[in-house]
Image (tube, helix red, strand yellow):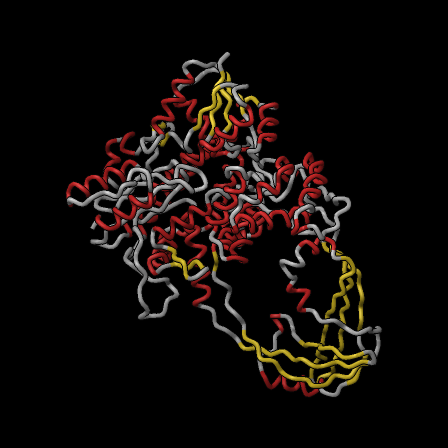
Amino acid sequence: MATLIITEKSSQAKDLRAALGARYGQILPAEGHLLRLAEPDEINPAWKSWSCVVLKPDGLYPTRAAAQGNKPAKLAAIRAALSACDDVILATDCDREGQLIGQEILDHLNYRGRVRRALFTAQDPKTLQQAFARLKPNAEMRPLYEAAVARQQADQIFNLSLTRTATKTLLAPGVRGVIGIGRVKTPTLAIVCLRELEIRNFRPEDYFEIVATATVEGGAFLMRHAPAPKMRIKKRAEAETIAAAAGGYRGPLGVTVDDKRQVPPRLFDLPSLQKTCGQRWGWTADKTLSVAQELYDGEGKKLITYPRAEARYLAENQIGDAPAIVAALTRLRGFAQLDIASPVIRRGKSGHFCDKALEGVSHHAVVPNVNVLDDLETRLTRLDDDEKRLFALICRSYLAAVMPDYEYRQTVVTMAVPIPGRTAAEFRAVGRIPLRLGWKAVYQAHEPDAETEAEQTLPALRDGESAVLSDARVEAKRTQPPPRYNEGTLVDAMQNAWRFVEDAALRDRLKEAKGIGTPATRAEIIKGLKRQNLLTADGKLVVPTPAGLQLFELLRGAAPALVDPATTALWEMRLDEVLVGKADYHAVIDGVATAARELIEALVEKSIGKVELAASAPARRRRGAPAATAKSAGAGPRRRGSKTQRAPKAKPPETDSNERGGRSKAPTDKMVAYAENLSRAKKVKLPDLYRQDFDACRKFLDEHAR
């Protein structure tokens, strides 16, 4: 019986050959998606002309062979191998898109033999050998495949139908470009625009707090009168009255002392990793994913588990790995000072190892790879500075998770100061004494606890002890607007779309969902909005352009559901229901098409105003400041292998990289053909790598498609 193993990319094929040899059969790689969905006009010639209709065929969009780069050759090699075998093992990534990449090839080529599935979250030899020792029938992965098909088909129908409609109804006359609408992209734009409008409409308010020095027999410390936000002191005269009453006042202290403990934070999934790297180092979401991907499958590295994680827990069968991982990490110079005699295992949803929390989830938390510990130091020598930094962060997270609780003694001191003609003002001080650093020891040298540092050291105090207040003074404060997003906090906002929903029942439902987009696609969504000139970078921050704000306002007025993050989050929940067998994927696709039809009708009926997709500065820029250079106005990128389209006379749109992780891009066939036509028409030389390098082709088009 001849067996063929199909991988998602060349790096997987290489790793499998090294781990398995020829034991299981021939190994051939894909290159991301080797197939594309048919274009609308390939289904219905009438759809070649852009109009405001739902582009939904009877049944599903069929697949077609992708033509760019090496994809035809790789598909041909797999086709030839399939004709001579009766057993296939799919060894693509184990998420829903990886399942689609492998299985769509078999369906497209009408393969009818046996299919098994290899599932792995790391690519070292031991992990791969273990995965092939416990192959699963591919039929068990049917729900994952159907969820991927539903996502792919729904995006094709929704995004293309609404992009055409928005372009026809909202694009300013004479403006060349495409108003790209996406099921995930447009609500993401809305999240940033809503924050920008909130900042613009914010009206700062002055308020006041009173600080005084409290003196007792054992020493002195500061006490503060700082009412809760709803009770803040808005008038300086009132604050001066309280300060005058506090100065020289002697009274008893209320002292409570509690011994407390704090468990370590959760492990990283990809969104929390992107948020942390954005906040600490200013990394974009895409950079975090790219560095993590290199740590996962880079040549001679493979130091972490699958980075596109969607959960912050580990399976309970990974408890046995803890001693070996701890022992290996604490042999490294950066962690040698840690004393972890016996790992602390916390089970359940309040801990770190929980099977129930992983139900319906493809990938556990990102942690060090237990199977490469024997030559860990050698692998570390292959890392660049960013890779070392990220690996250390992931290691600290794991070590913290298996270390003891942080224990501390907290002292809260209060004093009620009588105020003539009103209720007494409570002055307060808090002090914390660490009793046992526990997991905080792993962060102490690298990430000081700002909250703990801000607390003062208090002298020995007794409840009821008399103290004298002196040096009372008023401190002027001012309320601050919410912060703008960086890419990490924007990814977090996309994952937690329930925060934007007012209805309590719906909020609760959305907390169970995974927000808008997926861990693997959110970075590309943000990049696409920037390329479309709807978002832009302002230092480390992400802000809307004037065109982005204008589009958001028009869509919010005409079809508010289109920009409501809750809408697409609910659709993601429907995809999750397909995954766990609670919904039929055809019904999900039909539901998205129905929603698209309603939104098209709303845009046609209610839209007023036009979007100027011109060169525009960040929306927060001062009037009269220099404008930023416009990027392509073409439709922004979508998940790899999906298609975007352009209106007549528009610049060719951009598409996602077809190699996952975004590190290797090839231009689409349409981009290449358009570049060649321009070269002939304008008699200009094409760049050497215009067929292989997306950016080179894109730059040529931007320079000459005018």
The quarter of the picture where residue 538 lies is: bottom left
- Above or below, 34 against 294 in this view is above
Question: Is residue 219 left or right of 699 when viewed as pictured?
Answer: right
Question: Is residue 143 left or right of 192 when viewed as pictured?
Answer: right
The quarter of the picture where residue 82 lies is: top left
Most extreme residue toward the top is: 1
Pinpoint residue 11: horizontal percent, then vertical percent. 47, 33
Question: Is residue 667 left or right of 254 when viewed as pictured?
Answer: left
Pinpoint residue 382: horizontal percent, then vertical percent. 53, 43
Q: Is residue 136 visible?
A: yes
Q: Is residue 139 visible?
A: no
Q: Residue at x 63, y 58 (%)?
A: 446
- Above or below, 705 against 628 in this view is above
* Depth check, front residue: 395 or 265: 395
Exactly how many numbered labels are in the figure? 0
Q: Residue at x 52, y 70 (%)?
A: 480
* Depth check, front residue: 2 or 504: 2
* Depth check, front residue: 476 or 501: 476
The quarter of the picture where residue 42 lies is: top left
Pinpoint residue 333: horizontal percent, then vertical percent. 66, 50
Pinpoint residue 455: horizontal percent, then vertical percent. 69, 69
